[in-house]
Amino acid sequence: MPVKPSIKPADPRFSSGPTRKRPGWEPSALGQTSLGRSHRSGPPKQKLKEAIERAAAILEIPEDYRILITPASDTGAFEAAMWSMAGARGLDIFSWDAFGQRWLLDARDELKLDDLRIFEAPYGALPDLSKADPARDIVFTWNATAAGLKVPHADWIPEAREGLTFCDATSAAFAMELPWEKLDITTLSWQKCLGGEAQHGMVVLSPAARARLKTYRPAWPVPKVLQLFDAGDDHSAMFEGSTINTPSLLCVEDFLDGLRWAMKEDGLKGLVARSETNLSVLEDWVERTDWVEFVAADPATRSNTSVTLKFAGDAAGLDADGQRALAKAMAQALEREEAAYDILAYAKAPPGLRIWCGPTIDADDVAALCPWLDWAYETVRG
Ligand SMILES: Cc1ncc(COP(=O)(O)O)c(C=O)c1O
């Protein structure tokens, strides 16, 4: 029997969402003043506004961009953007994991856009981004959480463009630099890089996106929870924390806690550094380990948040079911030992493991995890 490593990660939570909370988090860290009050009344509204302002500061959002809070997490935010703004011109959609696929289905099967071009890639590669046409709208995911692949840059998006870019950045925001001048509509949730509570989303709007909201009404019906039309007005109350419907003020308090922690970590720079250090710990281990490799073939596309690994060497010779069973048994063994929770690859992704390396994870925990991964592999393979 392989010998168990003597040190365990201090926190075994490596899930890709909801993710672990920031180091030192306790329920008592949450403010209470907004609880049990109307979200339209003074102090709670102030908290919602503060969440927007702090997020804008940490994400280094340009002055002429605006942020609003939406219901239903990142899906709610992204679908609100699509239902409210798509269809004004032709749309190019780029998809390389299950989430990109979701936006594709929305565009093709729900909104039934007739002028739609689809660019897809199998797990492990990016589609040909150079095909993006700046005269058209562009839909893409900055970091495809299920695939573990991010776009390395936005050089393929011209600054001067006629269409709008719709970017799902939920597992990128607060852990990767985002070139705002290339992004017209960007969405994120609270339970990824800052370890917040789920069910709220944010939409970041460029001036061009707000102009679209002001001048365009889609042909399809838009449910109230997906209506962003009021955000066409630069002075909309939405940008001051007036939400579409009732938000969870406990989630807001928790998000504020994450934002305050982020500031203490030196803002975006510090968050990106924490996440990249975590990835580099795994990179060193993968480099010296013969049974594993990254799903992302090109290192430039390797996610520093949702890090995905597949089998190499002997184990890669197993068929897909065999590899899936191996990964599952490893993940279960690690969970039983309380060395790692929730690290099985996304169901539709190549069989293997997915390890969250976002900013709330400590590098020491990633380092402590590596010998446990070897232990699990050797134990299950026998
Ligand atoms: C890239 C991406 N898009 C969308 C979603 C869906 O997000 P939510 O559950 O916040 O609606 C996820 C969830 O993991 C994701 O990773």
Image: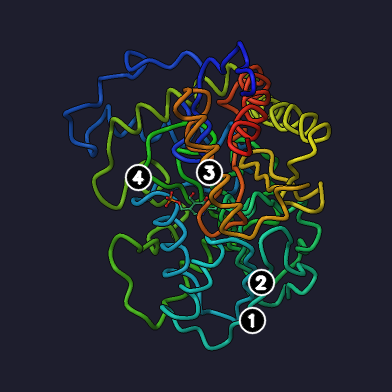
Q: Amino acid at mark 3?
A: Leu
Q: Residues within 10 Å of mark 2 (few under 14, many from 20)?
A: some
Give the crowd class for mark 4: few <14, some 14-19, many >=20 residues within 10 Å: some
**Number of other residues with Cα within 10 Å of mark 1, as a class: few under 14, some 14 to 19, many 20 or more:** some
Q: Is mark 4 within 8 Å of ligand 1?
A: no
Q: As displayed, is residue 333 above or below residue 90?
A: above
- Distance from disc 2 to disc 1, alpha carbons, whole Å, reads 10 Å
Residue 180 position, x and y percent, is: 67, 49
Q: Which residue is mark 4?
A: 199
**Alpha carbon of mark 3 to alpha carbon of mark 1: how far?**
33 Å
- Secondary element under disc 2, as helix, strand or loop, is strand
Image quadrant where residue 231 sits:
bottom left
Left/right placement of residue 164 relative to residue 134 reads left
Residue 151 shows in the view: yes
* Among the two numbered marks 3 and 1 on one chain, the one whose residue lies closer to the N terminus: 1
Residue that badge 1 annotates: 117
Q: Is residue 57 left or right of residue 292?
A: left
- Up the image or down, 229 lies above or below 147; here it is below
